[in-house]
Amino acid sequence: MTVQYSVSTGANSFTAAAHTAIEINPGSSLPAELIAMDVSSSYLTAGTPISVLVELVSNTAAGTGTSYTPKKFGQAVGTATATTKINDTVEPSTPTVVMGWELVFPAGPWSYQWPLGREYFLGVSTFNAIRVTPSATITLVVNAVFEE
């Protein structure tokens, strides 16, 4: 049985530049699968919309961010073997964009869930991230759900 975990940045201010919001880096013995992710904001100024590019990226090394203990879903036992970080202050090395989405705020929350059986596979000893690039400073909440 797989165990599901969530990672959240909480409400965090992102400036007009690329920022790694969440890193999920599986260990050397157990891969992971990204199940879902979402981005939301309380930004309400309709006359001045802000675009946010959301990207799923792979990197050649980890960045420097706040260590985060993934929150376990349900009644599963154990702890995640993947290391997770939020709100990187030093970006990871050599990002390769896997896929991206352009959002425009103000808008409702955006959520993406991979189809059952087709989750995004995160191989062992890999460096994976969700990166946001807003067109202006905005407060966002970025969440991810993964399983091991």
Image (cartoon, rainbow, N blue to C red):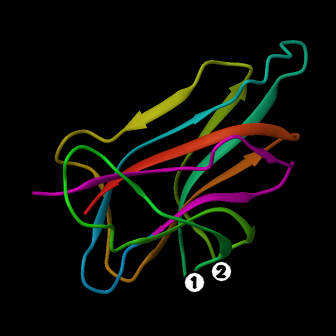
- Looking at the image, residue 130 sits to the left or right of residue 35; the answer is right
The residue nearer to you, when weighing 6 against 103, is 6
Q: Which residue is mark 1?
A: 61
Q: Position of residue 132 (x, y in %)?
A: 68, 50
Q: Is residue 136 above or below residue 15?
A: above
Q: Position of residue 114 (x, y in %)?
A: 32, 42
Identified at 80% across, 17% down, the residue is: 44
Identified at 62% across, 49% down, the residue is: 9
- Looking at the image, residue 85 sits to the left or right of residue 15; the answer is left
**First-in-chain label (2 vs 1):** 1
Q: Is residue 107 above or below residue 56?
A: above
Which residues are drawn in magenta?
1-24
Q: Is residue 88 above or below residue 7?
A: below
Q: Which residue is mark 2?
A: 93
Q: Is residue 56 magenta?
A: no
Identified at 70% across, 38% down, the residue is: 140
Q: CA distance from mark 2 to mark 1?
A: 5 Å
